[in-house]
Every structure is written in C-alpha cells, then in structure tokens.
Amino acid sequence: MRPLGRLIPLAEAKTLVDANTRPIERTERVPLESVLHRVLAEEVHSIIDVPPYDRSAMDGYAVRAEDTFSAGKFQPVELDCVDVVNAGEVPKRVVSKGKCMQIATGAMIPKGADAVVMVENTERSRKKVQIFRSVPPWSNVSKKGEDIRKGTMVLRPGEVLTPSKVGVLAALGMTGAEVYSRPNVSIIPTGDEVAEIGTELRKGQVYDINSHTISSILNENGCVPILHEVVEDAVESLIGALQEVSDADMIVLSGGSSAGERDVLEGVVSKLGKVIFHGVQIKPGKPTIFGVIGETPMFGMPGYPTACLTNGYVFLVPTARRMARLPPKIDLVQTLPLAKKYAADLGRHQFLTVKIKDGEAHSVFKESGTITSIANADGWIEIPPNVDLIDKGTMVEVHLF
Amino acid sequence: MRPLGRLIPLAEAKTLVDANTRPIERTERVPLESVLHRVLAEEVHSIIDVPPYDRSAMDGYAVRAEDTFSAGKFQPVELDCVDVVNAGEVPKRVVSKGKCMQIATGAMIPKGADAVVMVENTERSRKKVQIFRSVPPWSNVSKKGEDIRKGTMVLRPGEVLTPSKVGVLAALGMTGAEVYSRPNVSIIPTGDEVAEIGTELRKGQVYDINSHTISSILNENGCVPILHEVVEDAVESLIGALQEVSDADMIVLSGGSSAGERDVLEGVVSKLGKVIFHGVQIKPGKPTIFGVIGETPMFGMPGYPTACLTNGYVFLVPTARRMARLPPKIDLVQTLPLAKKYAADLGRHQFLTVKIKDGEAHSVFKESGTITSIANADGWIEIPPNVDLIDKGTMVEVHLF
C-alpha cells in the first residue's frame, strides 16, 4: 500500500488523453432504417435529379404562362381543359396554345405547359376553365433537379445523420449508407469484493455498479460497450483479461478502488504497454489511470460509483465522442444560487453533484462511495482548484446531466 | 378539388391534440442492459442495505477510535496489527484494545473496530503500527445502509432511467425493471406518385422521404415506428390500411400532398372515426389533419418533405414524448441576427428553417417540396402570424435541431 504520487492537473490529463486516442477509421454499411445518428463515412453524390421531373407544386391547371398574361380578377382568360394528370401519372397529351390540363400537386408538368395556376384562381364549367390571375413562366412548378441536382455532392463524410439527412438519403432512393463503425469498448469490472448482478451477494461483497453506469454513458455517446465478467485483482488475472480484449478500440477497467489494487493495475499496464498518467488533481476521481496497450487506449476508472461516473462524464464522454467522430456534447447549463455554503479542497478541481430545488443548487454529494450522490443529482458544478469556499447564494453554473 | 376551409390557430391545434392523446399504460419487463432511457413503471424499493456492511472508505488500519485519541504528529500511538482484511473477505479476527487490522478500501470493518486511520497517517514496522493522527468514531467508514437503506423507495414510476439511475438498479442487484412500453406508431406512406426505397423510379414517381424522416423523429422521442408499405390514394385502400394498423398506439399518414388526396383522407377518417381538425394556420404544414379512429389518434401529415418534417417537430415530437411519458424536449436556442430581410405571410405562424453562418441566421427555406430546405438547416425560427416582415439584423431565436 502506498499513496498516489504526483497528481497532474485536469487540463494536462485531458491533453494527454486526446494525444493518445484517435477517431475510428473502420467503416461499415448499414441499412437506411439503422442510419439515424450514425456518422457518414462516404461522399454521397446524387445519382438522380430531385425532383426527377418538372412537377406541380399546387393543385390547379397546367398552362402556357403567356396564355394567362392578360388575365385578371375581372377579365378572366378562358382555356380548354384537355385532360387530367394525377400524381404518379405520365401526361398523355400536350398543352398547346389556348389549352390547359387539370393537374394535382406532385404530378408531372405536361409538355407544352410552363406554369400552374392554383385552383383557387380558376373557375370551371365542363371543359372550359376561367383563369382569374396571370402567372409568370415556371410559377407553381418545382423544376427537375431544383431540390438536388444529379451529380451534386449532397452529404459529406463526417456528417451526423439527423432525421433530415436520413430524408436526403431517402430522396435519392438509397437503401443504406457507409458509416463509421461505433468504437467497441471493453468494460472489465475488477475487484475481489465485486459481485455480478444476478448472483447472490456473499458477505463482504457489493454489486457491480460501474460496468452498468459506464456502459450507459458509452451507449449514449456513440460507442458499443462490451461487458466482461468480473476479474480478480491479481496480476495474472488482469493480464489475462487485458489480452483477451486486446482487439477492442478502448478498454475501461471499472473497479479497483484501493491504492493496493491500483498499484497492481499500474504494474500490469506498465508491463503490457505504457501508463500515461496515474492520479489527477480532481475530486472525486483522483486515482484515475490512463494508459495505452498496443494501439488501444485504456482507462482505469476509480472504483467508487460516484467517482467512476463523474470521471466518466469528465473523461470518457469526450473521448468516446471523439473516437466515434461525434461532435462535442452540448452542455446544458443553468446559473443558480448555491443553497448552502460549501467548503472545497484546495488544489483539486472538484465536480460537485447538485440537485435543483426551489431555484437553488443543493449539494447532494455524500461521498464517492455512494451511488445516490449522483443518482439524486440533476447536474454538477465545477469548483476550480484555487477555491476553498463558496458562500451560500453564490451564483454557480449547473451542468445538467 | 377544393381549397381548405377554416384553418385553426396553432395553439388551438396543439390543445386539441393534447386532449385526444394520452400517456401509454402498457408496461413490460426489460433486462438491465436495455433499461437506459426507458421510463420506470414501478416503485423500486431496496431489498438490501447499500453498502451491505460497514466498510472501509480508505486503505489503512481498522482501529478502535478511542485508542487513537492521544495520537499526534509528534506523539504516535503504537498498535499491534493482528491481521489483514482485503476487499471481498470476511475478517477472521476481532480488533480489541491496543490492536488494529490492516484494511483495504471497500473491505468489511472487523468486529471491535469503529474507525479507519488512512495509511498516509501511519508508519509500520513488522507487526507494530505507529498512528500519527487521532480519529473520531466512524471516521473513514461507510456505514451499512448509508447509501441506500433496506426498504427505502429509491426510484419512482415515471422516472427516466439515466445512467446514474441504471447504477441505482445495479446497486440493488436488479437484473431488470418494469418500464412503460414504447408506443407503437404505424407510419403509412400514401400517394400514387410515391415509390418505396429500393425500387426503381418510374416516370412521374418520387421516392418516399417522409416515412424515413418521421420514423427517425419518432425513434428519437421514445416511440417505435412501424413502417407500412405505400398505399394508393383511394378510399378502399386507405380504409384497408387503417384497419390493418388499428392496434397501433398512434397512426401517422405521411403523404397525400394535394387537396384532392386530403379530401379523400378526410372522408375516410370521418367514416372510420372522427376528424378533429383539418388545416392549421402554420407555414409550412397548413393541410395537417388530426383525427381519432377508435381510441387511436391519427395524424395526416403534409406530403411535402420539409412541411412534413417541420410539422413532425411541431406536433409529433411533443405528442410522442407525452405518449411515451418522457419529459418535454429541452429546446436549445441561440439568439442571432437575421442575415437578410424576410417577408412572411400574415395570418400564418411560420417555421422558417435557417442555417447558422458567420454568426448570422440565414434562411435556407426554398419551398416545402424540397428536402434540402431542412437538411441544410441548423434549426428554425418561428414567425408569429401578425408579423409580415423581419428586417435584416433583427435578433431572432434559432431553435437548434
């Protein structure tokens, strides 16, 4: 048992993590119904014009615009209606001088016609249609390729496929798209006291919480969590487990709360790869380890549930998003008065979980070992390392979960 | 073909939708690995204490606090170390007067001991441990049930299972939870010009965009979209399709852009159920239909892609969330100057899609028939019905997608 050595500042730790993780290169083809929120890995060029034909934007009459030029509210022009064209149909006739064709929204503009008069501006009796308004050429017509021209690049690699971009793929008739794979993250719970959910607790054991909170935040941020069984805190077992998951894109060890266990882990990582840092000036989460094994970044998270999850938000969320090529998370922030004075630790950047009640931020932090310190929280406030006391009523920025 | 009759104001339309839709009652049991973001349907009472035993919060020595009372930096107290207790072990011995036991973080406090001295405040040589700091009783001990007391209600029906709440379920060893079912929403694309993705476009046809954008936003907001094949705009076909999906929690018809088609749909809904409104004072999306068939709410969305998706954000997102028992969506808003003057339509509440560029909001709205009017947008601004012109430079609130 030895205490942690030199702790590094939070900003330095983040820089080191960024320098040792990189956006995923692997791609895969997924069907259209599964592309939502995925990150596009290809240029999408339209192979068709959208719309694929000149089409009517209104219900009305397809006309030659010049035939309507003299029309007005009190001097209608009368045209002969030669046919009807419905949506999905190909017009069977041509519109020549003095003629018109009844047309539905979305239907093809017949040859000869170059504009549509809205039904509201017409009056019909049998084959005769009175036009009460003049229209310029291409009025109420969506021209072929007006929305998307054939050959245009419409979506670029790196774009997140939001609902409207899924709509663009659909407009082109694409049945799927090439997207970046979601990084696989192996989660290894460690600790001799940790029992798996679904087993009966023996004396001296607690249930594995961290695997489930960590896999939840990875899921929320573009990664695929892969849960490993609990591994005991022994050199050989840890080496075995780490080698087993060596093809993962990232490894997260989710337990090992004591200094002794962390020494074991630090030793194992040093042996298999390289420890980048061990110990950060933050609270909770001081004992966080980060290293690289082969090409694979590895986090050793603090074992205590609130410490583990807070550090998940601090380190894993931005890293997961960067690896998954998602844009940084947009933080929702509310500025509120602190309900009670709070004494902080000088020299450590603190993430204090708070609950919002009656327009004030109340600390709900009991200790890092509790899950309720975070489960009852609406968000957190950050206390910089050079602050040791925040007075009641001080305005604080609450970052919402 | 007839133009729409009386249009109702947006607020009235929203009130009518709320009055005719209700939160889902159906529940289902899902395993722990699938509970993230689901809505809890049961009270969760803890059947265990968390932690389940008094445990050490630090690496150090379990002591009787009173044995340390005279200890100080320059006058250590010396205790005999009788054993070691690691995490996951049951202590085999008792700590009596003048004794101590080496203990790891997370390990059970041995009988007799009532506090832990951190390793940093001790010095050891063989069996003798010098204690340089006095500790009060229960120092560095997490007491049994301190986090969650056995029998307490820890989660309530209606709570959304965020990562930290998933952690609470894990802490209790729960392998799953009873949650509200996600509402099933049947999406029926209609329109004779609409072709399914994966088929070849015939002349006069366009690909079905709306089913895919609508199913995306339903997916994002707690519902399960179920895609129906394209249905032609004929009374019998529409009746058949609506009867087929009568067990859905909601029905969305995603096409039918022309007034003629909408008359057909209005007639069909009147026959099978009741039309609540047809036509809203908004742009785009004027021809939106809302009705009820049996117990099932039904939306007839405008056929044009941008109109359909904008109306999806206006009507379907809040309705889907309410039905799924999710809290209202938190709108991300940026206040920016409008890049160019914009002439709006008096009498209609307009949703104008905009792109953010160089700190200004640029209109990207071409017309409702285009998908790029929304795919190139970062968000939208709302223009109230009594405004007909917004000057360049006016500060507008951009709601981000």
Image (cartoon, coloured by chain):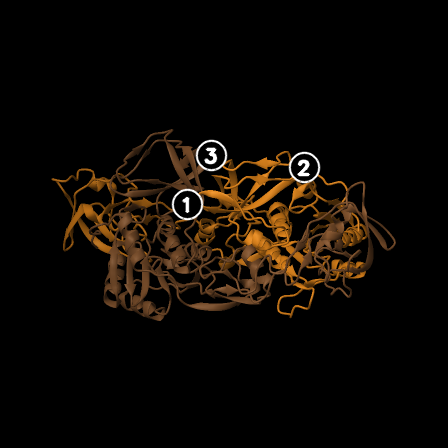
Chain colours: A brown, B orange
Q: Position of residue B11 (x, y in %)?
A: 66, 38
The disc at residue B347 is 2
- Distance, label 3 to label 2, CA atoms, is 41 Å
* Mark 1 nearby-residue class (10 Å; few <14, some 14–19, many ≥20): many
Quadrant of the image containing the C terminus of chain A: top left
- Position of A241 with respect to B285 (left or right) is left
Of the image marks 1 and 3, the number of the one nearer the N terminus: 3
Residue in view at x 57 percent, y 63 percent: A33
For the question of whether residue B208 can be seen, the reply is yes
Q: Nearer the viewer, residue A236 or A350?
A: A350
| Circle 3: residue type | Lys
Q: Residues within 10 Å of mark 2 (few under 14, many from 20)?
A: some
- The residue under the point 61% across, 48% down is B310
| Residue nearer the viewer, B269 or A227 | B269
Residue on which the image places disc 1: A374
> How much space separates mark 1 and mark 3, taking CA atoms?
15 Å
Q: Split into 4 quadrants, where in the image is the N terminus of chain A?
A: bottom left
In the rendered image, the residue lying farthest to the left is B74
Q: Secondary structure at mark 1?
A: helix
The label shown at residue A357 is: 3
Which chain letter goes with mark 3? A
Left or right of residue B282: residue A174: left
Q: Tell me if residue B294 can be seen.
A: no
Q: Nearer the viewer, mark 3 or mark 2?
A: 2
